[in-house]
Image (cartoon, rainbow, N blue to C red):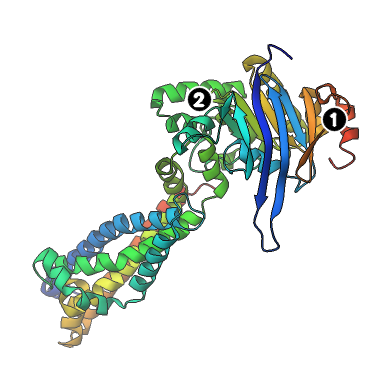
Amino acid sequence: MSGVKQMIEVQDLSVTYASPLGPVEALSHVSLTVNEGEIVAICGPSGAGKTTLLRCLSMLQLPSSGKILVDGEDVFAGTSHDVRNARQKIGMVFQGFNLLRSRTALGNVILPLEIRGVSRKGASEKACKYLDLVHMSHRRDFYPHELSGGEKQRVAIARALVTEPRVLILDEPTSALDPETAGSIVQSLREINHSKGITMLIVTHQIDLLAPICDWVTYLREGQLSEAPGSSREATPAEARVAAGGIVQ
Amino acid sequence: MTWFDSAWLGRVGGLLFRSTLETLGMVLGSLIGGQILGLALGITLILVRPGGLKENRTLHSVLNSTVNIGRSIPFVILMVTIMPFTRLLTGTAIGPIAAVVPLTVAAIPFVARLTETAMLEVEAGVIEACLSMGATWQQIVRYVLVPESLPSLIAGAATTAVNLVGYSTMAGAIGGGGLGDLAVRYGYQRWQTDVMLAALVILVGMVQGMQFIGDRMSAKFRRR
């Protein structure tokens, strides 16, 4: 498609771990392209390599071979300083929320801005804006242990968005939530995608819940990607379920 | 209690007060020194450990062994062994000011190990979250490791303070001053059991107070 910008390009990515029983190939020659503004879901069974792929995308793990380009830049090509800069283009929402217990909701959202050296006042104003975006302004002074699972997830999303990344990566964003809360989080993701045009890559088991907001769905099985029937970008939620072949719960 | 009257207080009150201040001074001085240096050593151990943010197996092995050796030397032997160093720093090897040196040296490996243990409890996922935000290792120490482990660090400081009270009495027994010195000189050498008991009551109260303050402060920062 001409005129469409490729935001994430994964090229022939392989990750091999050493183990006492010999090398384990977690990802095998994975290639994936996500265009700007798309929402893409990756589903697959446990141990398929989904988390390894996300860790590579967020530069927490070095691949054995292959490349990852975000917004046209090879994220592993530069120095550690370049890697830190590249990381700032990507917002990451973790499965376990990973909020700091010692900070309030507002303090957690301010953190990425503090890391970038933004002034306290400017960081606070911006963090409030993003807490408002995820409907969490009324809980800004609450500590994580005082928040419900859905509220923690909203704070984690605000924290990932506050630096205005080009890409948002979400690892099982709804798995720890009840159906109603999960539905409202999915709705929020759709709104954020529409209002900010942020590219989203979502790893999920709950394809029924997330497929309706996704532009397309792909499957990771035994370290290899397989696309949905026909053109993957045309897969409907129903096709997604069929193509998952019962492996996605 | 026939001996606890105004005449008795007038006779030994001043001694007890001065010795208490000496003990508090020794404990506080060595606690501050031990915490600063022990915290730095503990953070270094965390950073250079296998899988750490600045992994360096050789340095970790050296520091780890140093901490183990430091913790295994009995305090009385340590105090005597480092007397030349103490004399070099303070100009004397006896008295409460000189005792701060070996007390600090004894506290460093203890605090380092407590710091390492406290920081190992910080969830790896939280550190990874900060790395994914582009944080440097210095920022992770400042924003994650220290604040997230603060309740355990405070509890560790209270334990260290209580240990230092015990060590300070040993220091007193060999010329370090303070309540230990008072108890030995009056209680043991002059058979004045009342002075020894009074020193003991003050020491018990001191330990209780330190533990109480440590527990309260630790609870204040613990968010679970």
Q: Is residue A43 left or right of residue A164?
A: right
- In the picture as drawn, the residue positioned furthest to the left comes out as B91
* Closer to us: B166 or B3: B166
Residues packed near mark 1 inside 10 Å, few (<14), some (14 to 19) or many (20 plus): many
Three-letter amino acid code at disc 1? Ala
Question: Residue at point 51% right, 40% down?
Answer: B131
Q: Kindly indicate the quadrant of the structure image that contains residue B27.
A: bottom left
Question: Residue at point 33% right, 59% down?
Answer: B38
Q: Distance from label 1 to label 2 (Cα)?
A: 38 Å
Question: Residue at point 52% right, 41% down?
Answer: A100
Name the quadrant of the C terminus of chain A.
top right
Question: Does the image show residue B192?
Answer: yes
Q: Nearer the viewer, mark 1 or mark 2?
A: 1
Q: Position of residue A247 (x, y in %)?
A: 86, 43
Question: Does the image show residue A107?
Answer: no
Name the quadrant of the N terminus of chain A.
top right
Q: Position of residue A151 (x, y in %)?
A: 63, 33
Which disc is residue A151 wearing? none
Q: Position of residue A71 (x, y in %)?
A: 59, 23
- Which of pointers 1 and 2 lies earlier in the amino acid sequence? 2
In the rendered view, tell whether residue A182 sits above or below residue B78.
Answer: above
* Closer to us: B124 or A240: A240
Identify the residue position indicated by label 1 in the image. Answer: A228
* Closer to us: B84 or B210: B84
Q: Mark 1 falls on what kind of element?
A: loop
Q: Mark 2 falls on what kind of element?
A: helix
* Closer to us: B55 or B10: B55
Question: Residue at point 15% right, 77% down?
Answer: B175
Identify the residue position indicated by label 2 in the image. Answer: A127
